[in-house]
Amino acid sequence: MTTEQQLKLQAYLDGELPERETRKVELLLQDDVEAAKLFAELKNTRQALAENEPQIKFPESREFYWSKIAQRIQKLEPEEVSETNFNWRRLLWPISLTAGAIAVCFLAVILQNPAANKSDAIASISPTSISTDVDAPVVESAQADSEAMTYEDKSDGTTLVWFSADENSAPIKTF
């Protein structure tokens, strides 16, 4: 038996052959024992598959079931942001966090600085001038036996003051 004849038997079983081909296959089944056995086996296999295939029954119709699934999918999809529905809080949230963190750091530095809590300072700058330059501040040290050296750079407008003290005197606290 050829492969073409086997395929025609399968098509006959499925009811897919035209009338002329159907008559030829019926004659083949009457004349050929092997073809009749194959047809019987194909028929039994088809029946076994049809009877043992699980049938899932849904409580509602197919269209209603799939429409509920489509609605759930649409609910899960993100909505497009329009200009009228823009959420400014999402945009400003990182900025407000940064500003809050900077404010907390600033307060921590201010509260931890002991010089801000003391009423008397170790060195004070007075606006009175002893030198000939009217705008130059005068630096006074609260520690005895201390020397101060001043360096002025007029091109940069920078003034540096170094304090040195005697080895036996109390140390100057710097912050």
Image (spheres, rainbow, N blue to C red):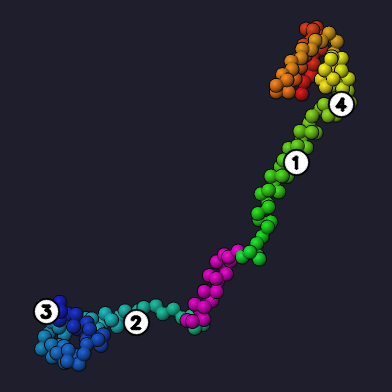
Q: Are marks 1 and 2 in contact (CB under 8 Å)?
A: no
Q: What is the three-letter code of the residue carrying label 2?
A: Glu
Which residue position is annotated with label 2?
51
Please tell me which residue is depicted at 81% across the width and 10% down the height of the picture: 146
- Residue range corresponding to the magenta coloring: 62-81
C-alpha separation, residue under disc 4 versus residue under disc 1: 23 Å
Q: Are marks 4 and 1 in contact (CB under 8 Å)?
A: no
Quadrant including the C terminus: top right
Please tell me which of labels 2 and 4 falls first in the chain: 2
Q: Name which quarter of the figure residue 149 lies in.
A: top right
Please tell me which of labels 3 and 4 falls first in the chain: 3
Please tell me which of labels 1 and 2 falls first in the chain: 2
Please tell me which residue is depicted at 82% across the width and 26% down the height of the picture: 115
Residue 138, placed above or below residue 45: above
Which residue position is annotated with label 3?
1
Q: Residues within 10 Å of mark 3 (few under 14, many from 20)?
A: few
Q: What is the three-letter code of the residue carrying label 3?
A: Met
- Give residue 20's mark: none
Q: Main secondary structure of the magenta part?
A: helix
Which residue position is annotated with label 4?
118
- Give residue 103's mark: 1
Disc 1 secondary structure class: helix
Of residue 141 and residue 139, the one placed in the foreground of this image is 139
Q: Which is more foreground, mark 1 or mark 3?
A: 1
Q: Residues within 10 Å of mark 1 (few under 14, many from 20)?
A: few
Q: Which is more foreground, mark 1 or mark 2?
A: 1
Please tell me which of labels 4 and 1 falls first in the chain: 1
Q: Are marks 1 and 3 in contact (CB under 8 Å)?
A: no
Q: Residues within 10 Å of mark 2 (few under 14, many from 20)?
A: few
Disc 3 secondary structure class: loop
Q: What is the three-letter code of the residue carrying label 4?
A: Lys
Residue 129 percent coordinates (x, y): 87, 18
